[in-house]
Amino acid sequence: MSQEAIPATDSRTTAELPAKPRSVWASPIRRREARDGIVFILPWFLGLLIFILGPFVAGFYYSLTEYDSLLPANWLGVENYRRILFDDDRFWLTVYNTVWYVCAAVVPQVVLGLLLAVLLNQKARGITVFRTVFFMPSIVPIVASVSLFIFILHDRFGLLNETLYQVFGIVGPNWLTSPDWSKPSLVLWSLWGIGGGMIIYLAGLQGIPQTLYEAAAIDGAGALRCFWKITIPLISPTILFVVIMGIIGSFQIFTPVFLLGSANYGLAAAGPMDSLLFWVVYIYNQGFFYFRMGYASAIAWLLFMLLVVLTLIQFRLAGRWVYYEDEAAIR
Amino acid sequence: MPAERAMLNIALGRFEGKSRKVAQSSLVYCLLVALGFLFAMPLVWLVSTSLKSNEQVGMWPPVWVPYPFVWENYFVAWTSGRFGLYFFNTAFITVLATFGQLLTASMAAFGFARLRFPGREVLFAVLLATMMLPFVVTMIPTFILFKNLGWLDSFRPLIVPYYFGGGAFFIFLLRQFFKTLPTELFEQATIDGASNYRIYYQILLPLSKPALSTVAIFGFLHHWNDFLAPLIYLNSPEKFTLALGLQQFIQRTEVRYQEMMAMALLMTIPVLMVFFFFQQYFIRGVVMSGIKG
């Protein structure tokens, strides 16, 4: 990349010339190349303006207005934000529900995903079959897997409660209709899809040179010691990636929450006693159900700002626990 | 001394290692089998329920192999839920949108990987930055944009945006791949008088089938599974996609689970087929998403 940006031959020729160096773009060949380059990226560039930057700026503008998408927007200033933060109890319930889920779902994604990957990284017969079994659930369409879980978690004749009752004599909770159990149900669903993160870890694990483990074994290190002293440090960049993507993704989770929340309660509802009122579900409710586009945009911007702050904090903290091999080589 | 110590360790390791290894690997197997059973069970349950008669659905002990197979479930659900139409709609959107992604993402990636133009590095940084942008920030204004264009309740909002770059991540993925192709190829073609358009079409694309397949698979998965965008943009039932059709099943008060499971399985089968046929591209894509920019 860098050697293309500043071609060595150019700097040599300009050094020989006593006159002012001509711009590289003056040559007709380079001009044609530049023109073609712009043509090739043009669709993306227009998309950037129309579908990303434009809406990004417009969204911030809408968040400062009252707008129902029919009448012209009515300027409010920061009123929407003030109302959300100080007068809207449902917003704080939303924050509570979402943060609850993020904590309960990301930790197993990161920890269990890694342990599963370590298990599946063994050289054992038939291991690829196991990898397939664990990975497959994560690609099942969400609507399909949620339908399946609605059935399995059915209060009376779902497979889970039937098994709990018939085998263990426990009367299972009302997974989907009790406000205490709707979020754990969602976590159960997310656990089933843990294979997505597992595959990313597996790729990281396979990048660790086997010689390190052999050397450690010669020095008498046990399996646990190897895990803490070799596996964890060398895979820490992958862990950071899974953590960051897990947090960003979980904060924005919509489809399964909306499906579970509206299954017995109608489209505007969010599960028993709003226990499945999550951030993006609330944006959907305000924006597309009540047509409060300005208010919904403000809620979206609050989530955006929170995610930016959280991601920055994680990159800052990453310096303390993430190990980059190339950096170590420089030192 | 240390050398002797190491030799001793190796010897001991070999000696102890054998029995320890056997114990270890059988423990790993037990764990894997138990966990694998847990993970596989829901899918088995999905298949089995979709073939059950109404009485067998809620039975204890659970019926794993229904007798007889009630294939009618598929037929009843397919016709009562207009799934033929939804299937067609979903396939239509998926094919057109994925094609747009392949075309414009590969174009942009070619521009960023092989052609030098002023501002390239800055624009590429912007591209990487947009990968981090959460979709919720643009969701409402984009909806308003399509509303003003009069495109609501049509397939256009689900297709047209994908003809404008097709997603930053895919451009990034393809650019990384294009950069690995030998420069001499392109130089030789240029010397022989081929234009950049011809190079793109006759050299770059044919050489990039693996990377393009990865993009195609992920595009397919995204459009096939997408729920939020069809939910927001489509209102008339005759325009619904499979995801929306299945959601209607969930919303029903009188649910016949065997039919719901049949349709859930029908929606899943194409995804699983793509997974099994193109496993290598598939895993590569997931892994690529884990590689830092």
Image (cartoon, coloured by chain):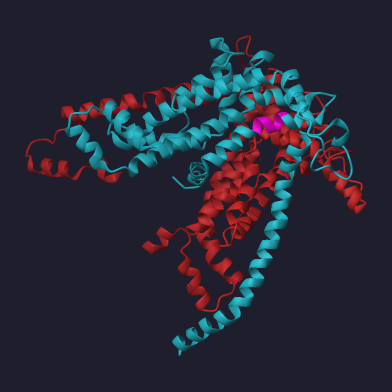
Chain colours: A red, B cyan
Q: Dominant secondary structure of the magenta stretch? A: helix
Q: Quick one: quadrant of the C terminus of chain A?
A: bottom left
Depth check, front residue: B30 or A87 = B30
Magenta run includes residue A71 = no
Depth check, front residue: B87 or B10 = B87
The reply, left or right, for residue A151 in relation to residue A330 is right
Q: Residue at x 88, y 33 (%)?
A: B55
**Coordinates of residue A166 in the picture (x, y in percent):** 91, 49
Picture quadrant of residue B237: top right
Q: Residue furthest bottom?
A: B1
Q: Residue at x 57, y 46 (%)?
A: A244
Residue B41 visible at all:
yes
**Coordinates of residue A73 in the picture (x, y in percent):** 60, 14
Residue A94 visible at all:
no
Magenta run includes residue B266 = yes
- Give the residues in magenta: B263-268
The reply, left or right, for residue A292 in relation to residue A57 is right
Residue B168, compared with residue A113, is above or below; it is: above
**Coordinates of residue A326 in the picture (x, y in percent):** 40, 58
